Structures are given as C-alpha cells and as structure tokens.
Image: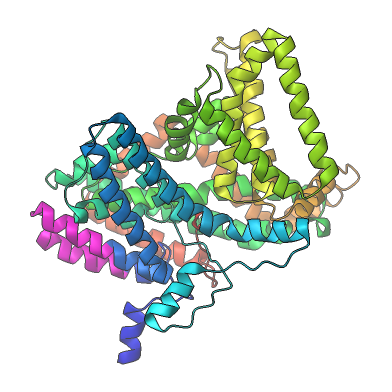
Amino acid sequence: MSEYLKHIFLYNTDNPFIFTKIGFWIFFAVVLAFYSILYKNRSVRNAYLFFASLFFYYKTSGLFLFILIFSTLTDFVIGKQIYKSQKPINKKLFLALSISINLFILTYFKYTNFFIDNINIIFNTDFKAINIFADLTNIITGTHFNINKILLPVGISFYTFQTISYSIDVYRNKIKPVNNILDFGFYVSFFPQLVAGPIVRASEFIPQLYQKYNLTKQEFGHALFLILNGLIKKIIIGDFIAVNFIDRVFSNPLSYSGFENIMSLYGYSLQVYADFSGYTDIAIGIALIMGFKLPLNFNSPYKAVNVGDFWKRWHISLSSWLKDYLYIPMGGNRKGSVFTYISLIFLFLFILILIGNLIITLIIIAVIISIVILAFIFPRFKKFVNTNINLMATMLLGGLWHGASWQFLTWGGLNGLGLVIYKLWKKISPWNKKNNKFIRFWSIFLTFNFITFTRIWFRGKTPEISKNMLTQIFNYNNYSNIGAIITNYWFVFLLIIAGFVIHWLPSNFKEYYRGWFIKSPMYIKLFITAEVIMLIYQFQTGDLYPFIYFQF
C-alpha cells in the first residue's frame, strides 16, 4: 500500500504527468470532482486550483517546484512595489529588478552549461558547472542531489515570460497588481498551460480570476472537440510518424537517401505542428471545462502567404510576446534604440563564445565595422539598417530562447532574414495587392517550403547533422529506389499526406464539422470519444514520448 501511495504522490522521473498518459487524466478527473463542489466560491476555487497546479508541476518536474514558487513570490511582491512607487525612477528600478531576477534564473538553468563548456574550449580551462540550487537543498535537507549537473526545469521559459509580462503590464498601468498571493500563484501556475504554453498575458487572464464560473453546452462540446483533436494530432499523427520514420533519418541522415531526408523534413514540419498545436488544443480544452479561456496559439500556420504571416499564425502567444515586450520597446521598424544595442552586444558576445575561433571572430568584427562605415556614408543604407535591425535582433533572440546553440541561432537568423527579404519584396512586388488564386497558392507554397527548410537547423541536434542532411538532399544522384522507399513507408507517408490535407482544408469546412460535433447530442459525443480513445490506444507507442516544446 505504501508503495502505491508513493507512486501516486511522489515524483517519478520515469512517469511524469503529461496529457498522453492515463495518470494525468485520472488526476484531472479527481481535480474536476472537487472543483464541482468548490467552483462557486471564487477565492476558494482559485486557491484550490493553485495547489492542484503545484502538485501537477511537482509530479512533472520534482523539486523544481521551488523555483516556480520563488518566481511567484518575488514577482508578486515586486509587482506591488512597482504599483505603489510614486517616482518614475523607483518604478523603473523595481521593474528592472523583476526582469533581472527572472532572466537570471532562466539564464542560469538554460545557458550555464553552454557557457562553461565553451569557455573551457576557448581558454583550455577545466571549470565545472555547479548546481547551486541542488547544493543548497543538500545543505538544508540533507539530500544527496548531484551538484555537478544543471537540468532544465520543465516550462521555465513559459512561466518566466508570463511573470515578466505581469511586471511590465503593472508598470505600464495596464493592470493593477493582484492582492492575493494565491490568486497570483494560480495565474502563474495554471496547470493546463504551465509547461508548454500558450504564454498567457496577465491582462488577459487575471480578470477571469474574479468572474463567475460559466460553461455552456456549446463550450463543453468545443472543449471536448479540442481535447480529442489535440490527442489525435499528438499521438496518431505526430508520435507515429516521428517514431517510425523522422527520428531515424535525423539521427543519421547519411544512412538514408535524399528522398528519405527530404520526406523526413516535410514530415517534421507536420510533426512539430501536430505535437505543439495538439498540446495547445488540449490545454485550451481543459481550461475551458474549468471556465477559463486561454488565447489562440495556432491559426493554420501552413496557410501563411509570407514569412510575416506565418509568425502571426505560429506560436502566436510567443510571437506577440516578442513583438510587444521586445521588438516594440527596441523601437520597432523606426530605428535602433539603446535597448537594441544592448541586445546586440549580448548577441555578439554570445556568438563569440559559440565560435571559439580568433580568426572568424576578427572577420565578424570586420564585417560589423564595414556595416557601420557604409551606414555612415550612405543614408539610404543607414535607414535600411535602422528599420530592420530590431527585426533581426528579435528573431535571433527568439532563436536563443529555444536553446543555446548555433542550430537555434541559425534558425532564428534565417527567419529574420526571410522577414527582411519579404519586406523588401513587398515594396516592389507587382502581385502583392492582387487577389489571385494562383498567386496565393504560389505564395503559400514558397512560404511553407522556406519554413520547412529552416527546420533543418531547428530539428538537427548538431551542425554536422544539418550539414549531412543538406548533403543528402542536394545530391541529385541520391534519389534512387524512390518506389521501394514509398512501399516500405507507405503508411507513414499516407499519414503525412493526410495530415497536410486536413491542415489545408478550407476554414469554413473545418468550422462545419467542428460545429456539427459541438451541436451533436451527448450520446454521439460519447460514442465518438470512445472511438477516438480506441484508435489512440492502437497508435500509442510503448515509450514515453514527451511534447517537443517541453525541452524549451
């Protein structure tokens, strides 16, 4: 019995809480059972969901729970001080304190190992990364955690951005600070979106804390549709094509033909969408059942007609966060600001550490000096740099948000370059304002292929893997036996095609079948739910396959 209770209540690295495991749905059923008793009392409801969310995060990430609690407490206190301060300078100082604490925690866990490893390579030193949090825990509690390894807490990038947005919104007088620490803790840690978003703005979510619970039959039907749709995306499409094809090719591209490499790249574009938007669908559905509305995070991104349109449709909560809290404060498309150049200095230092080569470093410095001189001599070039520098800096920082590596930096840079080129093309394009189906098709085709191409660096774990994949794809003598390959992977390819066909279906048709499900009688909903569960059971892989964005 004691072992059974430990299994239920203690963190287990081999069995974390995720939406694709039966343990999570048992947890959600229990939470919902007590919630049905407490929901009428808003303060009790919020406190209950806060503690339920803390338990969820503990079961997902173990003692990293205390990092979440620390972030919650500090931003709650600092938010009040920002609001109370009468002098603008004091408001700015408290805001800077909040941002500094949050970024220090995020940087420490996400980038310390990277910095130490590269410093050792550059200077031939032997520094060791010390996990100060594990060391402190060992001293206080007498535990024996490994202090020589710094692990990344699940969801830290998401809830850190949420708490930063709270402090900034209080500073901008968009919201008043939350008076109850339990209410604020609930906002920070709400379990459906805690570990992989969507990133929820305080100004959007906090007002909901004080609203009465309301769930119509239509909203319940919509929530159930989203949950089932998300599970289908994740397990039936995303996981299946990853396990049976994509992961194999990306692990060793040289062992596979050019056709297999290019199909794995298209497959990954579908997988990462199915995986991440599937998580978001489930999160929005679960939150809706409990009476809370989370923001839309995906809007058929592969229907985008240009790179700018794509980033308005993909991971919308992050894209809009970067725009409102990074790009616009830098100066937007007007000109660079002090904030811009501080960010660029950070990026430059980061790149120098990545390079670890004096000659290449000197070449980069020479290029930067050349750009400055050209901008000084030619006013039009200076205007071009000023109007695009913030865009490139934002996309490069967005790449680094995903991880400290050349891969993510290259991916972010390519997307930034794509945005800049589109801005230039838009000024001279004779077809930009024409509403022509062929032009629209061609625009979608080019955008989709460009975004898919950049994923070589997003998915490839090392530059060598990306290089090998490019070698195979552009080796035109490496496309033999296509018929045999299609025969071997016919079901995987069929799923990939089906996934894209569904994605590119007209929006009104999707609204039709979603509306039909929402309006259908309850016995129809239950029948479809049972059928989907049976289908998912058939497709589910034996190994734990976490959501892709858990690693960020």
Q: How is the image coloured?
A: rainbow
Q: Is residue 287 visible?
A: yes
Is residue 29 or residue 217 the one in the foreground? 29
Q: Is residue 526 magenta?
A: no
Q: Can you tell which quarter of the image residue 308 is in?
A: top right
* Residue that appears at 55% across and 40% down: 398
522 or 258, which lies in front?
Answer: 258
Residue 304 can be seen, yes or no: no
Q: Residue furthest right?
A: 477
Where 238 sits versus 203, above or below?
Answer: below
Q: Quadrant of residue 501?
A: top right
Left of 424 or right of it: where is 304? Answer: left
Question: Which quadrant of the structure image shows residue 113?
Answer: bottom right
Counting from the top left corner in percent of width and height, residue 296 is at 37, 38
Q: Image height check: is 407 above or below 152?
A: above
Which residue is most to the bottom?
1
* Numbered circles on residues, count: 0
507 or 12: nearer the eye? 12
Q: Position of residue 130 (x, y in %)?
A: 56, 69
Q: What stretch of residues is rendered in magenta? A: 26-52
Whole-percent x and y of residue 134?
Answer: 47, 72
Question: Is the N terminus in the top left, top right, bottom left or bottom right quadrant?
Answer: bottom left
In the picture shown, does residue 366 fall above or below 463?
Answer: above
* Front residue of this view, candidates 260 and 137: 137
Q: Residue at x 58, y 58 (%)?
A: 112
Q: Position of residue 480 (x, y in %)?
A: 87, 49
